[in-house]
Amino acid sequence: MIRYFRSLSLLLVAALVAPAGAAQIVVHHDVARQALTLNVARLIFTMRLLHWPDGTRVRVFVLPDADPLHQEFAKTSLDLYPRQLRRVWDRHLFSGAGAIPVEVSSVEEMLRRVAETPGAIGYLPDGLARGEVRVVNVQ
């Protein structure tokens, strides 16, 4: 019951704090990068850059394609349409040539998975990142 109320309160805070569609890239607290270029962000989220500079494997977490935050993130942070990302991921999956991102079901799960997975990267509504994850700017 407590977990339910905590989840509900987190979603309410996300709805109140974040304007519709505003997203920021977050990484596991051990990832050394402070900022990413647009090109590097695209390489990471299209699963073409698989390791951080220190050798740690990149673990990408995304929300479902239909999620409004995912759609806005793809358009504003990566300058891609969500369908373009899906096409790249499907090509990786069906060709056997590479991995695809881990899909999480909610913002709360995104925060939890990025916080507990070394090398993780994902995105959250503006203002929702806490101490266990760091915000990384796209330049």
Image (cartoon, rainbow, N blue to C red):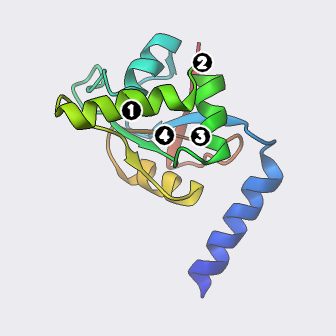
- Sequence-earlier tag: 2 or 4: 2
Nearer mark to the viewer, of 4 and 3: 3
Kind of residue indicated by mark 1: Val
Q: Mark 2 points at which residue?
A: 79
**Tag 3's secondary structure?**
helix
- Sequence-earlier tag: 1 or 4: 1
Nearer mark to the viewer, of 2 and 1: 2
- Sequence-earlier tag: 2 or 1: 1
Give the total of numbered labels. 4
Q: Mark 3 points at which residue?
A: 70
Q: In this view, does 94 lie above or below 66?
A: above
133 sits to left or right of 46: right
Kind of residue indicated by mark 2: Asp
Q: Is residue 135 visible?
A: yes
Estimate the x, y position of residue 121 in percent, counting from the top left.
Answer: 43, 37
Kind of residue indicated by mark 3: His
22 sits to left or right of 91: right
Quarter of the view holding residue 31: top left
76 or 80: nearer the viewer: 80
**Tag 2's secondary structure?**
loop
Q: Name the residue under label 4.
A: 122
Q: Name the residue under label 1.
A: 31
55 or 46: nearer the viewer: 46
Q: Do the residues labelled 3 and 1 touch (CB within 8 Å)?
A: no
Q: Is residue 26 above or below residue 139?
A: below
Residue depicted at x 49% and y 17%: 36
Q: Spatial distance from mark 2 to mark 3, Cα to Cα?
A: 12 Å
Residue depicted at x 46% and y 11%: 39
Q: Residues within 10 Å of mark 2 (few under 14, many from 20)?
A: few
Estimate the x, y position of residue 116 in percent, counting from the top left.
Answer: 38, 54
Query: Residue most toward the left?
Result: 96
